[in-house]
Amino acid sequence: MGVLKKELKKKDFRVTVFGSSRIKNNSKEYKQIYQIGELIGERGFDLVAGGGPGLMAAASKGHKSKRKDNSIHSIGLAIKLPKEQGVNKGVNVVKEFKHFSERLDGFMFLSNVFIVAPGGVGTLLELFYTWQLMQVNQICHVPIILLGEEWPRLVKWLKKYPFKNNYFNKKDLDLLYVAKNCDEVMKIVDEAHNHFKLGKKKFCLNYKKYKI
């Protein structure tokens, strides 16, 4: 049985973290995502990330430091690249992909909530792919949490141009949540977990302050 099929059969609650592979471990972003990984591990939730360096490693290593045993998984969805990145040591379940498209769908199959940390082209691709599939109801409506200094300016642009021009509507915009710190992120994650336990497919959070 493949790694993804085996994980899906367990029906665990999983938190995905997207973020840059280029951010160094002495940065505030790395330390923040490491802490979020710890908080996810403490709660006994599975973590899903890209398996590589940077913020992917921060999330996975933080998770490893707090998970009680190997029944709680840090899943690394790794990608084969010409310049090999390697899988970070926080991961205890690995699935490797040749193509980004297949890897993106792997994230979609596994995830019950998405945290989008600072990042570049790859992180933007992951954000917009996730958002678009929710918009057209190809995956369930779960929170997409934007954490980091770059996102408020992106949100401002989204409101000023495509939203103002009716290229998408308020319901689509409501799929995104902005969090200022780890506490706000985890309040949304905990609410998503409560939603998951009730078996509800779509998500609606009453915390208006997190809305963009």
Image (cartoon, rainbow, N blue to C red):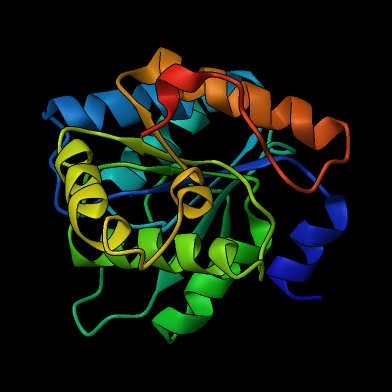
Q: Would you say residue 63 is visible in this rendering? A: yes
Estimate the x, y position of residue 204 in percent, counting from the top left: 66, 34
Q: Residue furthest front?
A: 165
Q: Nearer the viewer, residue 90 or 203?
A: 203
User: Which quarter of the picture shows residue 26?
Assistant: top left
Q: Nearer the viewer, residue 32 or 41?
A: 32
Q: Would you say residue 39 is visible in this rendering? A: no
Seen at 15% across and 45% down, the residue is 23
Q: Nearer the viewer, residue 143 or 103?
A: 143
Estimate the x, y position of residue 3 in percent, counting from the top left: 70, 68
Q: Classify residue 12 as left or right of residue 209.
A: right
Seen at 22% across and 41% down, the residue is 151
* Up-down relation of residue 120 to residue 36 (above or below): below
* Up-down relation of residue 109 to residue 112 (above or below): below
Estimate the x, y position of residue 49 in percent, counting from the top left: 46, 52
Q: Classify residue 22 as left or right of residue 93.
A: left
Seen at 36% across and 80% down, the residue is 80
